[in-house]
Image (tube, rainbow, N blue to C red):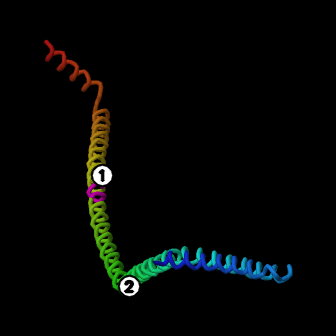
Amino acid sequence: MRSMVQAALIACLLAAAALAQETSGGEGSGGNLDLWKWANFVVLAGALGYLIGKNAPAFFAARSLNIRKDIVEAEEARKDAETRAAAVDKRLANLEAEIAALRSEAQDEARAETERLAQHTAAELAKIQLRAEQEIAAAGKAARMELRRYSADLAVELAERKIRARMTPATQDALVRGFVRDLK
């Protein structure tokens, strides 16, 4: 229907141009030129109207569809942003509780580490004390043995002096004779 109206409009314009040509046959060339200018204008305006009428609805429909699509996407993006902002606000609200929990956890870990270090230190001190006691006992034993050896050396030396002081040539002869007799 629409194309029929457009075709009729073009036919009318062409007929008007032809009619203008016939009626201007008796006039001078100046009037004829004005008529042709108007006829050309009408044909041009009609052709532009036809092209605009043909292409504009599809263009504007597509443009409207794109605008609606962009509006829907923008709405979805806004809702998504609001959701994320709400999540961030919720995390910020819980941030102090999380910080307190982290501090408490850190304090518990510090206490546990302190206790572990204290136990480790006590165990190491016990080992060191045991080693020191063992070394002291070994050093005491060595010192007692050295003291006994030294005492024995002193006793032998003292006995030797006493024997030499009492040893006379007659006693030496009697000892040698007794030794020889024991050998026989």
Tell how many labels: 2
Residue that lies at the very extreme toward the bottom in this rendered image:
93
- Residue 2 on the magenta span: no
Residue drawn at 31 percent across, 58 percent down? 128
| Upstream in sequence: badge 2 or badge 1 | 2
Q: Quadrant of residue 119?
A: bottom left
Q: Which residue does the numbered mark 2 point to in the structure image?
A: 86
Badge 1 amino acid: Glu
Magenta region, main secondary structure? helix
Q: Which residue is mark 1?
A: 135
Q: Residues within 10 Å of mark 1 (few under 14, many from 20)?
A: few
Q: Nearer the viewer, residue 180 or 174?
A: 180
Report the side of 106 relative to 43 (left or right).
left
Residue 139, position as x, y percentages in the image: 30, 50
Relative horizontal placement of residue 136, taking residue 62 as reference (left or right): left
**163 and 83: which one is in front?**
83
Q: Is residue 157 above or below residue 182?
A: below
Mark 2 or 1, which is nearer the eye?
2
Query: Within the image, what quadrant is residue 36 found in?
Result: bottom right
The circle on residue 36 is none
Residue 150: image x %, image y %? 31, 43
* Amino acid type indicated by mark 2: Ala
Q: Quadrant of the C terminus?
A: top left
Q: Residue at position x 30%, y 48% from top?
A: 143
Secondary structure beneath disc 1?
helix
State the image coordinates of residue 180 (x, y, percent, origin top left).
Answer: 18, 15
Residue at screen point 37% across, 87% down: 93
Depicted 158 relative to depicted 11: above or below: above
The picture places residue 21, in percent across and down from the top left corner, at 74, 77
Q: Nearer the viewer, residue 82 or 45?
A: 45
Q: Nearer the viewer, residue 164 or 86?
A: 86
The residue segment tinted magenta is 127-131
